[in-house]
Image (spheres, helix red, strand yellow):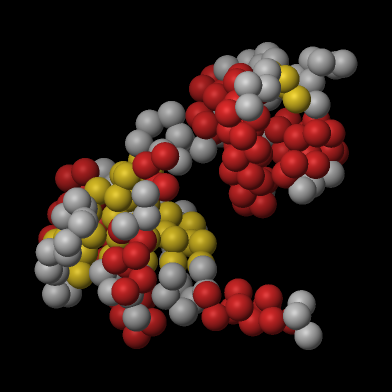
Amino acid sequence: MLTGEFSQMPRIDIPRKSIYRLSIYQRCLSKLKENDVDTVSSEALAKAAGVKPTQLRKDLTYFGQFGTRGLGYNVEALSSTIAQVLGQNHLQPVILVGVGNLGSALLRYGGFRKEGFEVAAAFDLSPRPQIGLSTPILPMQDMAGFIEANQVKMAILTVPASSAQAVTNQMVAAGIQAILNFSPTILDVPEHVVVNSVDLAVELENLSYFIR
């Protein structure tokens, strides 16, 4: 059980890997809720998440005291608190920049809203309507104004490497604080901006090592 409200806790520095693992714990808890499981031990939840129980307990202590000795964690209460920590208790607006093949595929992905994110708009140098898409595709010159007017803090970047830094500079200047980067390049951003890069070629190269 939670002994303190997360909203009353002071802002503290949390390791990025701990934040990443929270998302994994949340998915495990969602499956438990689907199966009508009310409580789970740290050992069982850690095993499902692929971590050690000590790591699980350490990650959770950043946000409060959870669980009852001998009974484990209340699944609904822990899931609710993690959702609040991750900002899933309300829809987070996100923009997508670069509506090429990858950008279009991401716009068609239906899982963002389920996880608490809404792609509010997409931007491209040559915006054009696409069949089956409800997300508005707008010209790049409208991006800064849209970010500021809608207080958007997160962006998905799927532009070519040659233009990624210039687009990033525009987004950061307009108020973007977190970027999911699919462009195959390293972005230079201020300290207050967080970038998670997904390089598909690097991921495939990594996987190829294990099939030799």
Locate residue 111, reporting x and y percent: 42, 47
Q: Is residue 34 above or below residue 161?
A: above
Q: Is residue 117 visible?
A: yes
* Quarter of image, res 73: top right
- Total marks shown come to 0
* Quarter of image, res 77: top right
Locate residue 114, reporting x and y percent: 42, 39
Q: Residue at x 58, y 17 (%)?
A: 5
Of 60 and 39, nearer the camera is 39
Q: Is residue 82 visible?
A: no
Q: Is residue 185 left or right of residue 113?
A: right
Task: Name the image quarter holding the C terminus.
Answer: bottom right
Q: Residue at x 46, y 79 (%)?
A: 184
Locate residue 118, reporting x and y percent: 32, 45
Q: Is residue 45 above or below residue 155?
A: above
Locate residue 138, reporting x and y percent: 14, 61
Q: Is residue 84 left or right of residue 57?
A: left
Q: Residue at x 37, y 42 (%)?
A: 113
* Quarter of image, res 145: bottom left
Q: Residue at x 79, y 20 (%)?
A: 72
Task: Name the image quarter holding the N terminus.
Answer: top right
Q: Is residue 139 left or right of residue 180?
A: left
Q: Is residue 63 above or below residue 148?
A: above
Of 132 and 169, nearer the camera is 132
